Amino acid sequence: MAKVKIKLRQEHIDIIKSICKKFDYKPGELINVLHQVQGEIGYLPAEVQELIAEELKIPVSKVFGVVSFYSFFTMQPKGKHPISVCMGTACYVRGAESILDEFQRVLKIGVGETTPDGKFSLTSLRCIGACGLAPVAMIGDKVYGRLCPDDVKKIIAEYND
Amino acid sequence: MGETNMDMIKITIDNKVVEVAKGTTILKAAKDNNINIPTLCYFELAGMDIVNKPGSCRICVVEVEGRRNLAPACITECTPDMVIKTNTTRVLNARRTVLELLLSDHPSDCLVCPKSGDCELQNLAIRFGIREINYVGEQSTYKQDDSPSIHRDMNKCIMCRRCEMMCNEFQTVGALSAINRGFTAVVSPAFEEDLTLTSCTFCGQCVAVCPVGALSEINHTGKVLRALNDPTKTVVVQTAPAVRVAIGEEFGMAPGTIATGQMATALRKLGFDYVFDTDWSADLTIMEEGTELLNRLKKFLAGDKDVKIPLMTSCCPAWVNFFEHNFPDMLDIPSTAKSPQQMFGAMAKSYFAEKKNIKREDMVVVSVMPCLAKKYECSRDEFKVNGNPDVDYSITTRELASLIKLANIDFAALPESKFDDPLGESTGAGVIFGTTGGVIEAAVRTAYEIHTGKKCPKIDFEELRGLEGIRSATIDFDGLPINIGIAHGLKNARKLLEEIREGKSKFHAIEIMACPGGCIDGGGQPRHHGNSEIIKARWNAIYEADKNLPIRKSHENPSIIQLYKEYLGEPCGEKSHHLLHTHYFNKHNVFEVDLNKK
C-alpha cells in the first residue's frame, strides 16, 4: 500500500488539466474529457486515467469502467498510421472479416494493437457511412474502398517509406 | 371506508386485492402481504440508508396483466389497478431459465467454496431443485486476487454489483467498479489491478454483502491451529466487543444473544493458553485517547492556535486507511492512540510477557475480530518489533465459529466462564466500543470525571446512541459544553472531514466507525443477508452487556489502574507514547513529472 507514484510528461499533465478545467471539473463530463484527451494524446494509459480521476475528484475505477466499456477508447498508443477496418453490416457481408484478417497477418498484430515500430495500429469500427464502397478501410483520414485481401499488402507498402 | 387516501392505490396480487402506498415496488407489496418473491441482486439494509437494486439479475420477475414481457418486481412500481401474478408457470419457468443461465457461467465447486452453506445462489439452486445445468458454454475466468484482508475470486461473480454499491455509495471509497462489457464484464479495481494497489480500506463491507463466494476473507484458521499445536508457543487470544453479541448466531442462538461466557469456555477448549479480552485494551484506549483529548482541549481553551481540534477517534482501521488515502493533509487530526487490538498486542508482548517471563518470539497473539481491516492493521510494519508483529493473526467471528465447529464443540451447551486476569478484566465502557457512539460515550464517562474531578451525574448517555449515519450532541462538562460528532459509514466520515477542512466544524471530538452500525456489522461478522433486525438485536445486546457489568467506566478498571502503577506510569507519558501511540502515512497517489521521457 505504498504511495503510487505516477509518472507523466509535463506537457501531457498540462493538456489533461486544461481539458478537465474546460469541462469545469464536472464528473458528468467524464466521457467528453476522455474523448478530448484521447484526441490530444492519442490514447488513455493508466497514468492519464489516474490524473483525470484526480482532477474530476472521482474514483479511478469509475474512469477505467468507462474506458473499458466503450470500444472507442484505447489504452494502447496508436500507430503513426492508424488503420480502421469497417465491420458494419454492409462491409461485413462483403467480406470485411477477411480484410481484417489479412491486415492482422501482414502486420503481425491483433486488433487493438500497434506494431513494435509504432508505425501501424489496427482497430475495427462500425460503419463510416461509405457503404457503397464496401468493404472499406481507413488509414489515417484516407478511405480505401472495394477492397479484396490482395490489396492489403499494396496499401501497406504505400506507407513504408 | 370514508374518504379515499390519494396516496394509496389498489392492486391485485395473486388474486388478492390490497392497498399499497404510491411508489411501492411490486417486491415490497408482495413482502407486506406475505408473498415471497426470490431475489438475488436486490439488497437492502432497512434503516441504514443502504439499497442495491440494479434490476439486473431478473430472478424476481412476475407477470403483470396487460404487459407483454415479465416485470422485475424489485424495480417495478405498482400502478393503480395493477393485476400481478407472482407464481404462474410462465413466471416459474422464466426464473428457472434465468437461474440456469447464471449457473452456466458459475463454477460448481460448492463443496470447497468458502461460502458453501451460506450462499444465496446455492440456496436458490436448492429452492429451484436444480439437478443439472442445461446450458453449456464458455465460463468467464479472471485472476485470483489476495490482499491482507480480502480474497477475490471473480470467476464466481454474478454481477449483482452489491459490492460496488457498498464501496462507492456507502463508503465513497471507489476501489471497485463495473468494468468491461458483455461477457467479460466484472466488478474490479481500475486496470484489473490487485486490491492492495487501490485506495481500498479493507472495511470488508463488499464481503459482507456478496451473495456468493466471489468475495471472502483471507482465512487464518490454519495458522492459528498450527500455533495452538506448537508446544513451544504460548498462545494468547483477545476477543473484540462485537464478537460476543454475534457469535451465537453461528450456532443457532437468537440474534442479540450475549455469549461472552460460552465464548471464553470455547476458546479454552480450543487450547488457547490465555483467554483475554480486547475490552480490557478498549479501557486502556480510553485512558490514552481521553487524556489526549483533554490535553488538546486544555491548550485549545487557553487560546493555542496550533492545537488540532476536533480530535477524531482512531480505533477503526478501515477509517484510518480512509483518511490516509483521502485526507493526507489532515493526518494530525485523528488521535495518535493505537486501536484496542494493537494496544492489546503491544501490552501482551511487553507487560504480560515480562510478567510471565515469556520471550516475545515464543508468544503468539491471536485476535478475534468482527472486522477484515484488522487483518491488514496487524500486518502493518509500524506494529512490529524486529519483524515480529504485536498481533500475529487476526481472525473473524466467522473464522472462530468455524474453528469451534471443527473441534466438535457444542457451543450453545457450553458452561459460561470468565476471561483470565489481568488482560481480561474490563468495564461496560469497553463493551460499548462495539457499536457506533460507544467509543465516544466511553471517553465521555472518563474524560468528564478526570476533567472536572467530580463524579459524573450519569453513566448512560442516550444522546450519543442511535443508528442514524451522522449524530451530534453537546455534553455539559460541569459548565464546559463539549460538542461531539459521531459518524458511521465512510461517506458520513467524509462529510465531517470536509467540514473540518473548510474550518466549519463545530465539534471538539468526533467518533468514526466505517461499518453500518459500527463493529456489530463489521465485515467479519455472521452474515445478516440484508436483515437489519439482526444488527439492531446486536446493538441492543451491546448496551445490555454494558449494563450487566459491575464497573462501567474505564478509569475504574482495577487492572488498568494496576498497569499504570506498575508499568506505564501515566496516560500519554513517555512509556505509553512509545508503546501505545502510532503515526499515520500519506497514501495518496503522487504525480511526478517523468524527465527521462522528454
Image (cartoon, coloured by chain):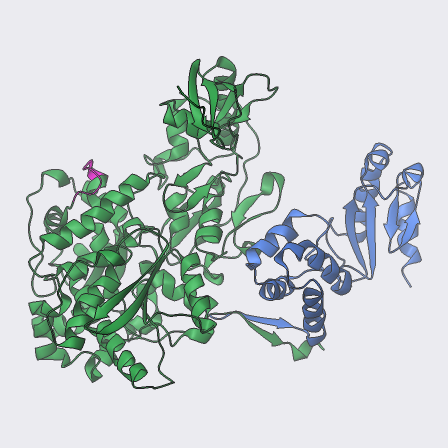
Chain colours: A blue, B green
Q: Quadrant of the C terminus of chain B?
A: bottom right
Q: Nearer the viewer, residue B91 or B144?
A: B91
Spot the residue most to the front: B2
Residue B554 image-quadrant placement: bottom left
Q: Is residue B253 magenta?
A: yes
User: Is residue A90 visible to the viewer in this orientation of the structure?
Assistant: yes
Q: Quadrant of the N terminus of chain B?
A: top left
- State left or right for residue B436 relative to residue B187: left
The stretch of residues the image draws in magenta is B250-257
Q: Nearer the viewer, residue A155 or B185?
A: B185
- State left or right for residue B351 relative to residue A53: left
- Give above or below for A134 relative to B458: above
* Residue at figure coordinates x 21%, y 74% from the top left: B479
- Give above or below for B272 relative to B120: below
Horizontal and vertical percent for residue B323?
42, 67
Horizontal and vertical percent for residue B259?
14, 46
Residue A156 image-quadrant placement: bottom right
- Give above or below for B412 relative to B503: above
Q: Number of marks in the image?
A: 0
User: Is residue B285 visible to the viewer in this orientation of the structure?
Assistant: no
Q: Nearer the viewer, residue B502 or B117?
A: B502
Horizontal and vertical percent for residue B373?
35, 58
* Residue at figure coordinates x 14%, y 61% from the top left: B459
* Residue at figure coordinates x 85%, y 37% from the top left: A91
Q: Main secondary structure of the magenta part?
A: loop
Q: Is residue B484 magenta?
A: no
* Residue at figure coordinates x 90%, y 38% from the top left: A131
- State left or right for residue B70 relative to residue A69: left
Q: Nearer the viewer, residue B548 or A144?
A: B548
Horizontal and vertical percent for residue B324?
43, 69
